[in-house]
Amino acid sequence: MRAGERDLARTKLDTEMRPFRGKVKGRSDTLDLLRSVRRVLGIPAGEMARELGVNRSVLFRLEQSEERRTISLKSMDRMAAIMGCTVVYGVVPRDGKTLTEMAERRKWMKRLGTRE
């Protein structure tokens, strides 16, 4: 990818991911999201398990795997779809900076021959 293309792609990603940047600063309030959404929608575990084609214990293990951060995106997407939702996936800098800021810092660190 050429430098100009990279800059445009970085700017586009920074714009698209803006709503998520503030969510990552030490917060992990989405580790129980599937169970929380299921409950607030009033979907009983048995109904959800039937829709997934599994028994309730498998459903509970899937929800626990989300808490442990071991759930697959495929499983999350499938569960979300059954609830009439979609998974929004994002990768944003941990410190809330933009990709542009991170790239600029990386460029200067490389020029100065230093490491973070």
Image: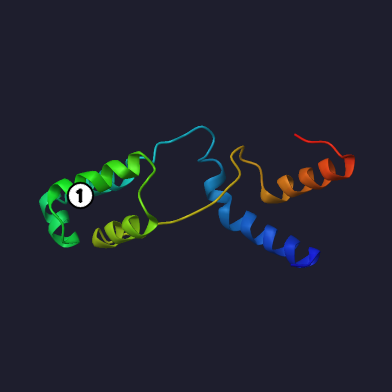
Residue at the image point whose x is 73% and y is 46% from the top: 101
Residue at the image point whose x is 51% and y is 32% from the top: 26
Q: Which residue is mark 1?
A: 59
Is residue 44 at all visible to an observer of this figure? no
Residue at the image point whose x is 58% and y is 58% from the top: 16
Mark 1 crowdedness (10 Å alpha carbons): few <14, some 14-19, many ≥20: many
7 displayed left or right of 19: right
Q: Inspect the image, locate mark 1, and give the three-letter code of the amino acid beneath it.
A: Leu
12 displayed left or right of 80: right
- The relative height of residue 100 versus residue 24 in the rendered view (above or below) is below
Residue at the image point whose x is 57% and y is 48% from the top: 92
Give the image quarter of residue 68. Answer: top left
Question: Can you say which quadrant of the picture contains the N terminus?
Answer: bottom right
Outermost residue toward the right?
Answer: 112
Question: Can you say which quadrant of the picture contains the C terminus?
Answer: top right
> Element at badge 1?
helix
Where residue 14 sits: x, y (%)?
64, 54
Identify the image's colour scheme: rainbow, by chain, secondary structure or one colour.
rainbow
Residue 68 versus residue 34: which sits nearer the camera? 68
Where residue 90 sits: x, y (%)?
51, 53
Give the image quarter of residue 108. Answer: top right
Is residue 81 at all visible to an observer of this figure? yes
42 displayed left or right of 97: left
28 displayed left or right of 78: right
Where residue 80 sits: x, y (%)?
30, 57
Residue 77 versus residue 18: which sits nearer the camera? 77
